[in-house]
Amino acid sequence: MIFESHAHYDDDAFDEDRESLIESLQENRIEYVINVGASMESTEQTYELAKKYPFIYAAVGVHPSDTFPLTDKDMNRLKELAADEKVVAIGEIGLDYYWDEPDREIQKKWFKRQIELAKEVDLPIIIHSREAAKDTLDILHEYDTGNYKGVMHCFSYSPEIAREVVKMGFYIGVGGVCTYKNAKKLVEVVEEIPLEHILLETDCPYLTPVPYRGKRNSSLYLPYVVEKIAEIKGVTTDEVERVTYENAMKLFLNK
């Protein structure tokens, strides 16, 4: 069984076949899915998906690229949603310096506010961090009280940073990028980080693994990620599925 820890089935890319695709997942051994909010609008859509499908759970939060219009009212709404048993994380939250907007201070403000919310409601965080390693780590250390729970999704940094993130209590999210020819750094991270600290994810509809790179991604392609991780670590695909499943169950469902 496979636990998909990061999907965006609310995305427009799934408008034509969302229902049939989602209904096919469990038939293909995708046991659970965390659908992740990226804006206030997508968070509401994510919540509705989680309420509709028993095996889908929601993460509610706002991606750094969508933080400019945020208000205190939005934080109150996230807190309301977080009270529902189908909401199991705050995310995706973090910093993205690939683009010039929103201003970095705005991103940092709302990253901190959403970390505070996660601690208040006692939920794990799903972190998005791109080209912002130092500021991300500085903020995480600022709020570290020794009880962090969460995952740095779509990990793109060095093994050294991965070790620091794991030491703080986080998992590393690994998806289709690990199958790419230019993914040397991520392969090194997977080699070095114990399987007990890795989660499977797609970030679908994005980052489709080889051999389907360039097409729309979905949880149905996770076996290709499993195969690559097994190859890198020299273990069986069954072992990768079992351990990553247990990791996600522990983090998101407290089981």
Image (cartoon, grey):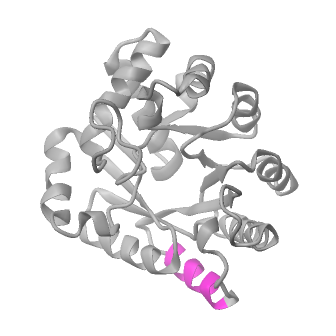
Q: Is residue 3 above or below residue 47?
A: above
- On screen, residue 51 versus residue 109, left or right, reads left
Where in the figure is residue 129, as x and y percent of width and height?
66, 51
Where in the figure is residue 128, as x and y percent of width and height?
61, 54
Q: Check the picture and name the quadrant holding the N terminus.
A: top left
Quarter assignment of residue 241: top left
Where in the figure is residue 245, as x and y percent of width and height?
40, 36
Q: Give the tally of numbered discs.
A: 0
Quarter assignment of residue 56: bottom left
Q: Check the picture and name the quadrant holding the C terminus.
A: top left
- On screen, residue 138 versus residue 234, left or right, reads right
Toward the top, the furthest residue is 234
Viewer-nearest residue: 191 or 252: 191
Viewer-nearest residue: 66 or 98: 98
Q: Is residue 88 magenta?
A: no
Please tell me whether the stretch drawn in magenta is mainly helix, strand or loop: helix
- Give, as a single range, the part of the protein colored magenta: 73-83
Viewer-nearest residue: 223 or 254: 223
Where in the figure is residue 21, as x and y percent of width and height?
17, 56
Q: Is residue 188 above or below residue 220?
A: above
Q: Is residue 75 magenta?
A: yes
- On screen, residue 144 versus residue 212, left or right, reads right
- Residue at 22% of width from left, 70% of height from top? 15
- On screen, residue 48 versus residue 129, left or right, reads left
